[in-house]
Every structure is written in C-alpha cells, then in structure tokens.
Image: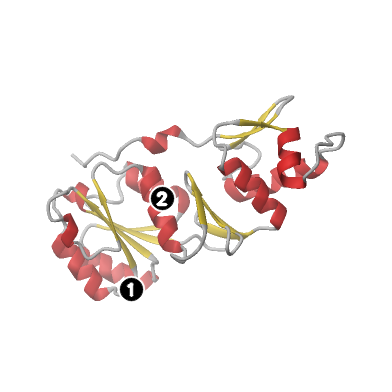
C-alpha cells in the first residue's frame, strides 16, 4: 500500500529540515515554495494533506491558507502558525502554534487521515484505530488480527517500559504459561514488519534479553521545529 501523499509548503521546503525529514520518514512527500505552486502540485498528485509551514516563511500565512482552502476544498490542511495573533482566523483544519514538535505534527496528520469518529490510540508516530482494527505506521494502514491489536495496544499503553514475556502472555493470550512462547515471538516479528523500516535492526521494538520486549519512542521527536534562518 502506498504511503499517504503529503504536500509541504514553506521556505526552501526541499532543503533538509526537521519538518521535511520527519514527513519524508513516514509519508510520500511533495514540496512547494509558494501557495500557487502548492495548489498545482496538490491537484496533480492528489495529496491527502497540505502542511503550510508559515513559521519557516516568517509570515502568518493567512492569505496563502485562504487560497489553499478555496482551491483545495476537499484536502485536509494543517497550518504551522507563528501565532498566537490571528491564528483563530485560519481556515485550516488544524492550526499548530510555534513551537511545533514532530510528534505533535505526526499525531495531527494521523488524526486527519482517520475518521474523526474512530477510536484512536496514538503512540509517537503510530496510530491504532480500534474501531477499524488497523495500524497506521510509516504512512501505511495495515489491518490487524485481534491478537495483533491486543499486543500492540499493550505496548502503546506502556511505552519505554520493559514488558516481560509472562505479562505479555497474560494480557494477550490470557495465560501465564511461558513454557512455549513461539506464538509471542511470531507476533513480535509481525509487529516489527509493520512498524520498522528495517525489522532486522529495530528502531522502536527492542528485545530485552532474558526478559521480554520494550517499545522505545525516539526522544528526538520531542524537539521543537525551529524557524528557517
């Protein structure tokens, strides 16, 4: 399944930056340096969300936002606003005031990609939709079995915490028998294939030898985006 298409509009949006790097890691990213070019690209590539980085452009961006809303009425729009003055006048679906963390931006995008009525559980860059029983990871939505959903929910509810095998067996399979945990190991492998760019070298779901597993959420996601200089 193709990753969701996102358009980033900002000052030098194609240059390496926290915003562009974060979006490229999780979605198919298109960039534009003006609202006019952004509208053209959004229509050509049928993007699902437009991120207007007015912070990098050193402007409130309200005029550009109005143009985007008029030209792209069905596309979700996120406005990174230097605010707070005039932020309430933005026509965007979501307005994020400076400073904006990558985790907050990813969570906002994930929310817009889902039905607002869905039951969501967000952990870092990942989102579980309990109602639809799906996982949104790295820009892709994957259906989950009931046991996969329970396992991932357990990790999401206990981030950065080592969970021993007995605990996982109890919560997911309702048993404290750990004589054979091959089923757990297989499910861990499946989860890694869903959330990791390289499952053989996991960035998030780590093995704690002799104990169990731990879901580590990268702390760099808490760093605030800085305006371009």
| Vertical side of 35 occupied by 224: above or below | above
Real-space Cα separation, disc 1 to disc 2, in angstroms:
23 Å
Report the side of 69 relative to 206 (left or right).
left
The image's colour scheme reads secondary structure
Which residue position is annotated with label 2? 106
Residue displayed at 56% across by 43% down? 156
Numbered badge on residue 43: 1
Above or below, comparing residue 198 to residue 67 in the picture: above
Identify the mark nearer the N-term, 1 or 2: 1
In this picture, residue 9 sits left or right of residue 141: left
Q: Are there few (<14), some (14-19), or many (20+) residues within 10 Å of tag 2?
A: many
Answer with the quarter of the image where residue 201 lies.
top right
SS label for mark 2: helix
Q: Nearer the viewer, residue 16 or 173?
A: 173
| Residue 184 or residue 120, whichever sits in front | 120
| Residue 119: percent from left, percent from top | 52, 59
Observer-nearest residue: 167 or 216?
A: 167
Circle 1: element type: helix
Kindly identify the residue that appears in the image at 16 percent across and 49 percent down.
84
Residue 23 appears anywhere in the view: no
Is 39 left or right of 167, judged from the image as shown? Answer: left
Q: Position of residue 112 (x, y in %)?
A: 40, 62
């Amino acid at each position: 399944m193709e990753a969701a298409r996102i358009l980033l509009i900002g000052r030098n949006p194609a240059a390496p930056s926290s915003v562009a790097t974060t979006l490229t890691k999780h979605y198919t990213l298109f960039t534009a340096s003006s609202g006019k070019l952004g509208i053209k690209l959004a229509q050509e590539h049928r993007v699902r969300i437009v991120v207007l980085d007015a912070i990098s452009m050193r402007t409130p961006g309200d005029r550009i936002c109005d143009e985007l809303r008029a030209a792209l009425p069905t596309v979700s729009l996120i406005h990174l606003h230097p605010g707070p003055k005039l932020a309430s006048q933005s026509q965007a679906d979501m307005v994020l005031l400076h400073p904006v963390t990558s985790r907050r931006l990813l969570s906002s995008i994930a929310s817009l990609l889902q039905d607002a009525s869905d039951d969501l559980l967000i952990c870092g860059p990942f989102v579980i939709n309990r109602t639809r029983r799906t996982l949104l990871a790295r820009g892709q939505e994957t259906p989950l079995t009931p046991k996969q959903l329970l396992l991932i929910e357990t990790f999401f509810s206990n981030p950065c915490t080592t969970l021993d095998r007995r605990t996982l067996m109890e919560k997911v399979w309702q048993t404290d028998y750990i004589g054979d945990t091959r089923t757990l190991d297989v499910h861990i492998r499946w989860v890694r294939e869903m959330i990791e760019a390289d499952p053989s070298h996991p960035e998030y779901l780590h093995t704690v030898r002799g104990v169990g597993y731990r879901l580590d959420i990268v702390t760099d996601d808490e760093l605030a985006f800085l305006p371009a200089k």
